[in-house]
Amino acid sequence: MVVVVVLLILPKLSLFSDAELSNDPTNNSSLFVSAIVVKAGIMENILKSAGTLLASEEVVLTTEVSGIVRSIHFEEGKRVQKGDLLISMDDSELLAHRDKALHQKALIEQTLERQRILLEKEAISRESFDKIQTDLLVIDSEIELLNTQIQKKQIKAPFDGIIGFRSISPGAYLQPGESIARLVKSNLLRIEFSVPERYQSANLEGRRVFFSVAGFEKIFEAQVYAIEPSVDANTRSLLLRALYNNEDLRLAPGMFADLSIIISRDEDVIQLPSEAIIPQMDGEQVYIYRDGKAELHTIKTGRRTERNVAVIDGVSVGDTVITSGILQLRDGMSVQIK
């Protein structure tokens, strides 16, 4: 019976001894970890946002006057130049009124010349001469008005661009304000996006913006040219616009853009990956590898990015900081770097 009891107790004593040994940080067993050698480098604070591509100029073509469409001078989806004739409306009645006014003007000019001769001979009063001269000024004003009305019967392109689908046909009666087609200038695109209000003082005007759009692997570059002077009270965000040179017309207005903007850029900054830092109530700590052991050090951190944290104090260039197995480590524990 004594032999049986001893055989039952020995394995348990061995188990407890192994457990105590494994909990002892001074034992020879080592934990395999990953680590990095601390270096000073450039740290960029990059802000990510989402935006929309807008045409530099865009307008829905319409008319100020009503009339019948006589002819259409553009093709849908084609490029047009500023001043190109797009729509001709019926102006025959206005042309007839102008011809009448021109004949009247010629008659008044002849009468005015005769009246000038008579006035020099004092054969008529000054009042009669002034009346004829006023009639000439009035008819000139009427002709100018008719010319303006005739010009409004012709719809021309206000700027260079690509014209879209037309919504009218020859013979249609066009009303003021009725849509004719959409004209878009897209060789320059504006990117509109917003950033949190705390970046109001970051001097963002002139900063470069890098963005990507669906269907393209290339990263495009734009530049901030304008900032909305007021902050949106609902979203507490600041609206910005950047300009992109789209001479090849690869991108189209209305596309969605994933973009990033560099807020700040600092050099010679000691930075660590965020997974290496242990948050504590009174600060933050890291494990530094020295002589085969993990040493716990308190650090002071600064600015953060998505992956890295700037370290102001507690770590020096050349230190080896442990980045994995953090939860299993204890101060003074033996470790081996993978």
Image: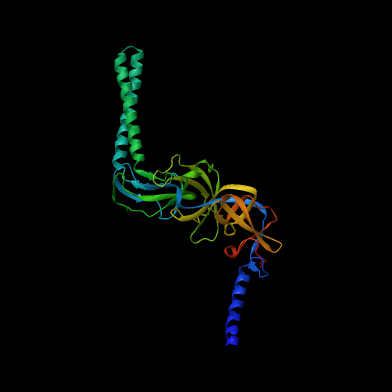
Q: Residue furthest front?
A: 2
x, y percentage for residue 70? Answer: 32, 49
Q: Is residue 63 among what the camera can see?
A: yes
Q: Nearer the viewer, residue 322 or 327?
A: 327
Q: Residue at x 65, y 48 (%)?
A: 267
Residue at the image point whose x is 52% and y is 41% from the top: 201
The colour scheme of the drawn protein is rainbow
Q: Position of residue 240 (x, y in %)?
A: 48, 45
Q: Could you tell me which quadrant the C terminus lies in?
A: bottom right
- Of residues 29 and 290, the one drawn nearer to the viewer in this rendering: 29
Residue 14 or residue 155, whichever sits in front:
14
Quarter containing the N terminus: bottom right
Residue 25: give x, y in percent of width and height. 64, 65
- On screen, residue 124 versus residue 208, left or right, reads left
Hey, which residue is sitting farthest top in the picture? 122
Q: At 31% across and 21% down in the image, what residue appears?
A: 132
Residue 80 visible here: no
In the displayed structure, 132 sits above or below 9; it is above
Q: Is residue 185 left or right of residue 282?
A: left
At 32% across and 22% down in the image, what residue appears?
Answer: 134
Q: Indicate the position of residue 279 as horizontal and vertical percent values.
A: 55, 55
